[in-house]
Image (tube, grey):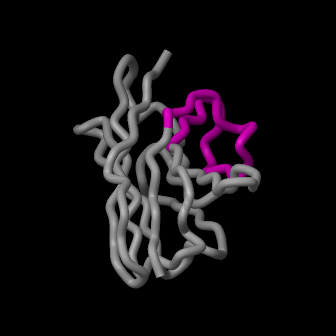
Amino acid sequence: QVQLVESGGGLVQAGGSLRLSCAASGRTLSRYVMGWFRQAPGKEREFVAAITRSGVSTRYADSAKGRFTISRDNAKNTVYLQMNSLKPEDTAVYYCAADTLRALPGGRSYEYEYWGQGTQVTVSS
């Protein structure tokens, strides 16, 4: 089993940047496809970005393309989400998740078996 802990959230003005981190313990992160999802109040959890085990391939939601970058450092057992040009509509709790079964970065929450507790991102206008 793997435990995931997100950090790096906070309050930022529109146009600003944040870098989220997801640290894993219990298992080697390099074994898993990793994803970031988010959930805004009153809305369903939605896909943001995902990355393959090696980090060679990535996948983004349309809302994240050109602004967010997912990366990983398997030596540090950590996955990152660099978020630039933030907008108020990016306000949500952000979760990282691990997919233990697939090799390709999925965009559906049911494809991920392990989840962190989330970190709040608030973007003010």
Question: Which residue is more in the foreground, 87 or 35?
Answer: 87
Residue 70: x and y in percent read 43, 60
Q: Is residue 75 left or right of residue 113?
A: left
Question: Which residue is more in the foreground, 113 or 10?
Answer: 10
Residue 103 location, quadrant: top right
- Residue 15's place in the image compared with 114, above or below, is below
Q: Residue at x 52, y 51 (%)?
A: 94
- Residue 96's place in the image compared with 83, above or below, is above
Count of marks, rendered view: 0
Q: Is residue 108 magenta?
A: yes
Q: Is residue 100 magenta?
A: yes
| Residue situated furthest front in the rendering | 125
Q: Is residue 36 left or right of residue 78?
A: right
| Residue situated furthest left in the rendering | 76
Q: Residue at x 75, y 37 (%)?
A: 110
Q: Is residue 16 left or right of residue 39?
A: left
Residue 72: x and y in percent read 35, 50
Question: Which residue is more in the foreground, 88 or 76?
Answer: 88
Question: Which residue is more in the foreground, 18 or 50?
Answer: 18
Residue 93: x and y in percent read 54, 50
Q: Residue at x 37, y 77 (%)?
A: 13
Q: Residue at x 54, y 35 (%)?
A: 98
- Residue 101's place in the image compared with 14, above or below, is above
Q: Which residues are magenta?
A: 96-117
